[in-house]
Image (tube, helix red, strand yellow):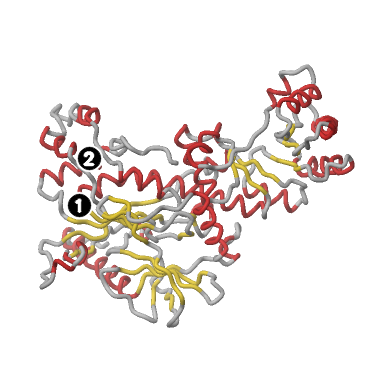
Amino acid sequence: MSDSYSGLALLTDLYQLTMAYGYWARGRADRRAIFHLSFRRAPFGGRYAVAAGLQPALDYISNYRFTAEDLEYLATLAGNDGQRLFPDEFLRYLESLRLSVDVDAIPEGTVVFPHEPLLRIEGSLLECQLLESTLLNLLNYQTLIATKASRVVAAAGGDTVLEFGLRRAQGINGALAASRAAFIGGCQATSNVLAGKLYGIPVRGTHAHSWVMSHDSELVAFDEYAQALPNNCVFLVDTYDTLQGVRRAIEVGRRLLARGHRMVGIRLDSGDLAWLSLQARRLLDQAGFTDAVIVASNDLDERLIQSLKHQDAKITVWGVGTKLVTGHDQPALGGVYKLSAIEADQRAASDSEEDLSDTDRIAWRPVMKLSEQPIKNSIPGKLQVRRYFRDDGTALADVIYNELAVPQEPWMAVDPEDPTRPISGRRHRSFRDLLVPMLRRGKQFADLPSLIDIQRHATNELSTLHAGIRRFDHPHRYPVGLEQGLHELRQRLMLEGRAEIDGDRPGERR
C-alpha cells in the first residue's frame, strides 16, 4: 500500500506552467523531448548515493490531473499588467491533459553516482516540462535520506538501526518520505506508525520520560508499564539517574520473569553513552539478563556511532532521528532536470515506419546547457548507464552512453569532469544497463518491487562497491565516464555554443 500522489498537479513552480503555456501558445507543445534527472555531487562528502523516491514519482505521473479547483485557481493568476496569465482555452487544454510520457529509470535501491541519469522522461515538451519540480522534490529528498541511512547502517556494523525521526522531520510529508527512504537505506524499523501502515515498515517503540515523570517513582513507572505491556518492555532509564534506572529496570525485569515474560532491554538517551553502556552491560549481565539489549538514542549519526563503536560501547540497537531525517550535515541533494534532446523540424524518413518506435521515427537534435562552471555543463542525447563488473561481482566502472548512437566495444570513456582522464576497459566484461522501462505512454510497464525487496536490493548494491568507495573519510572515487562518442558529441556542442556566444559578443573573450 502507498500514500496517494493524486491531485498534485499544482505542486510545481509557476515557471513550469508559464513555459507550458508558452509552448502551447506558440505551437510547440507537442514537439517531442527527452529530459534527464541527475545530481552533480554525491552527498555527505561521500562518493555514492542510493536511488530512492521512484515509486512515488511514478504514482505522481500516473495520477497527474488538473482538478476543477486547480483550474479555477489558475484562472485568477495575473501578470504584472493585471491581466490573466492563462486564457480559458489553455485551461481547457489542461483539463483534458493526460500524460503519455515514457519513463525509464534506475530502480530504487541502486547505488548511483554524479552525472548519471536517475530518470529519463520522453514525451511532449509540455508534458516533460510540467513534471520537473515535483520529480526533483520526490527523488532529491528520498535519495538523500536513503544515502544517509546507508551510512548510518554501515557505521552500526550489523547492529539494529531504528529510524526515530518523526518529531524532528520537516512536516508530515517529510516524515513519511524519510521513513520510507530510511528503510530503503537499511533501517530495520521506524517509530512512525503511519509510515508502518502505508509502507509495511515494522514499527518499534515503548515509552518516554513523561511516562516515568507521571508516576510517583521510577520503579513504580517501570512496574506499571510492565504490567500493561509485558511483551514490549524496553525501559528508558535516564530520567533521573541512569545507572540507578538500570538497577530498577533489572528489579522489574525479575518480576516479569516470574510472570513468564522477559525484559527486552533498556534505552540510554543522554550522558556519556560509551561509559554508561559499559556499566549498564555489566549490571545486566551480573543480574542474568545477558540477552537484554541496550538501545541508544540522542542525536546519533554515522560519525558518532562509529566513534562509540571504536570506544567498545555495548550498544546493539541504535535509534537515529534528527540527523537522519533532516540530512543534518547536507540538507539537500543538488539534483537537476535538464533537456537533452528535442525533436528536429523534420522527422526521419523510413520505408517501414509502422515497425518503428516513437523514438526511432523521430529525428532528434541533441542539446546541452553551457555554464561558466564546467560541472554544470549538461550531457546531451538519450542517455543510458552501463555498469561493468569484475569477475567477483564487484562494480568496476560506469559508462554513460547515448542510445541514439551505437557505443563501441571495447569501451572507451572519458571522465565528464576531467576530459584528460580516460577510462578504458576490455572486451567481454559482464555489464548491466541501469535505466529500465517503468512507464510507456503514461502506463505502468512492469510490476514494481515491494519495499523490502528494494531494501534488499540496496543492501546487495552496496556490497558490490569496494570498501574504499564506501568509507567516510577520503573515499575512493568510483570511475564514471562518458562513452567516447558521447564525449565527442558533447565537446562539439560546447564548441558550437561557445562560437555562438562569441558571435553575439564580438571581441569578448569567453
Q: Nearer the viewer, residue 160 or 242?
A: 160
Amino acid type, mark 1: Ser
**Residue located 79% across and 21% down the image:** 220
> Are the two marked residues, 1 and 2, in contact with CB atoms closer than 8 angstroms?
no
The quadrant in which the N terminus is found is top left
Q: Position of residue 203 (x, y in %)?
A: 59, 38
Residue 473 image position (x, y, % from top left): 61, 58
As rendered, which of 352 and 93 lies closer to the eye?
A: 352
Sequence-wise, the earlier of marks 1 and 2 is 2
Q: Which residue is mark 2?
A: 17
Separation of disc 1 and disc 2 at Cα?
Answer: 14 Å
Q: Residue at x 55, y 65 (%)?
A: 465
Q: Rate crowding at label 1 as few (under 14), some (14 to 19) or many (20 or more) other CA atoms within 10 Å.
A: many
Question: What label sits on residue 124 in the rendered view?
Answer: 1
Residue 285 in percent (x, y) is at 86, 44
Q: Quadrant of the C terminus?
A: bottom left
Q: Which residue: 40% across, 50% down?
A: 54
Q: Is residue 263 left or right of residue 323?
A: right
Q: Residue at x 77, y 36 (%)?
A: 263
Q: Residue furthest right?
A: 286
Query: Which of the numbered marks, if any, corresponds to residue 442?
Result: none
